[in-house]
Image (cartoon, rainbow, N blue to C red):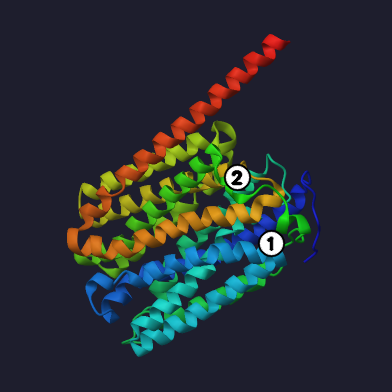
Amino acid sequence: MIDLTVSEDTSDDARARRNVARLAAAQALTGANSAVIFATGAIVGVTIAPSIGLATVPISMYVVGLAAGTLPTGAISRRYGRRAAFLIGTGCGAVTGVLGCLAILRGSFALFCLATFLGGLYGAVAQSYRFAAADGASATFRPKAVSWVMAGGIFAGLLGPQLVQWTMDVWQPYLFAFSYLIQAAVALVAMGIVAGVDLPKPVAADLHGGRPLGEIVRQPRFIAAALCGTIAYPVMNLVMTSAPLAMQMCGLTVSDSNFGLQWHIVAMYGPSFFTGSLIARFGAPVIVAVGLALEAVAAVIGLSGLTAMHFWATLVALGVGWNFGFVGASALVLETHTSAERNKVQAFNDFLIFGLMALGSFSSGQLLANFGWSAVNLVVFPPVLLGLCVLALVWSSKRRDARLAAVDVAERG
């Protein structure tokens, strides 16, 4: 790795493209690790948790890890560089697999929750991959860089559930134990990949430069971007977390839930091959709005039936909606800060997203156990409507201000 210091207007897109390739590969491997947790967490929870209402707690602990890891990831990146954060994150991923395996072998619910928490820390670091891809890139290439790194997750949709399918029965009667051991090996491969990412070296301005965080987050554009991100991701997580257990409760098989999760992850990341181009053509606000609307469509499908096909269609629509909503919101965040402000703003944005996810995730098991799959889907509609309203208000105000500024310039001319 060659450490370089870049100024505000540096736009070395050749280097950025090389980074995108590595970060996309790392995104795929990290996504495979999280896919193992989401595919197995609730099912393992049912077998070793004190009660069925606690079955989704391991997945909730993963989300808590996501929230807990965002701000430390930003702090480590500011002081030591993003590569150091990446290596620490992949290390947490390897430990996740080892502890998860031991927890299943010993039947320890607490140890399994610790394992998934560490998996969340790994996931928190991986969330910064999309922003790291934009470091040093030109303004026109940044949305594509973010989108292409996210596209790496499509391979996670192919690899993660298949890892579970191929390995879940290897150590009978300890279902999924070997799956977690393989997960540890996948994290070590990712460590080797991120070690070669070529990113700017931290400079003093990254530690103390730029505006205060409070000033930045009070911008209407940041508020809208962060709000849409905190709706798109937690809503997706709520439904996705509940779906495997709901399918089991409806008499469907583990293979059915693995298949649904596999295509959900493909739907989450597959559109990223062209999401950046769509943002460049139509604007990020439009793409975010389409994404939120698709999440509502997913809930409608979920309410319409309980067959495997209904679950699969719900998960696919949910995945596409998440992609448009989350990638679009990430692109909006990039418009709200300077280079010196990037780490603290991006980390704070992700903290908001995953902090809210953590709060909501703990309720998903109780919501499903006490009120059923329909209640999970009904919860989707109010936040989606709120996000669409705020997005429309902020960007209509922005367009109005732009028109007034243009008229003022014309009158002075």
The amino acid sitting under disc 2 is Ile
Q: Residue at x 46, y 67 (%)?
A: 34
Q: Is residue 224 above or below residue 53?
A: above
The amino acid sitting under disc 1 is Arg
Q: Can I make out residue 61 in this image?
A: yes
Q: Position of residue 203 (x, y in %)?
A: 78, 59
From the viewer's perspective, tell me whether residue 162 is left or right of residue 297: right
Could you classify mark 1 by the number of other residues whose Cα lies within 10 Å: few (under 14), some (14-19), or many (20 or more)?
A: many
Q: Residue at x 55, y 25 (%)?
A: 399
Q: Secondary structure at mark 1?
A: helix
Could you classify mark 2 by the number of other residues whose Cα lies within 10 Å: few (under 14), some (14-19), or many (20 or more)?
A: some
From the viewer's perspective, tell me whether residue 246 is left or right of residue 149: left
Q: What is the distance, in whole Å, between disc 1 and disc 2 at their CAs?
A: 17 Å
Instruction: Please state which of residues 181 and 295 is positioned toward the viewer in this rendering.
Output: 295
Q: Residue at x 80, y 64 (%)?
A: 2
Instruction: Please state which of residues 394 and 310 is positioned toward the viewer in this rendering.
Output: 394
What is the count of numbered marks? 2
Q: Secondary structure at mark 2?
A: helix
Can you tell which mark lies on residue 216? Answer: 2
Q: Can I make out residue 170 in this image?
A: no
Q: Which residue is mark 1?
A: 78
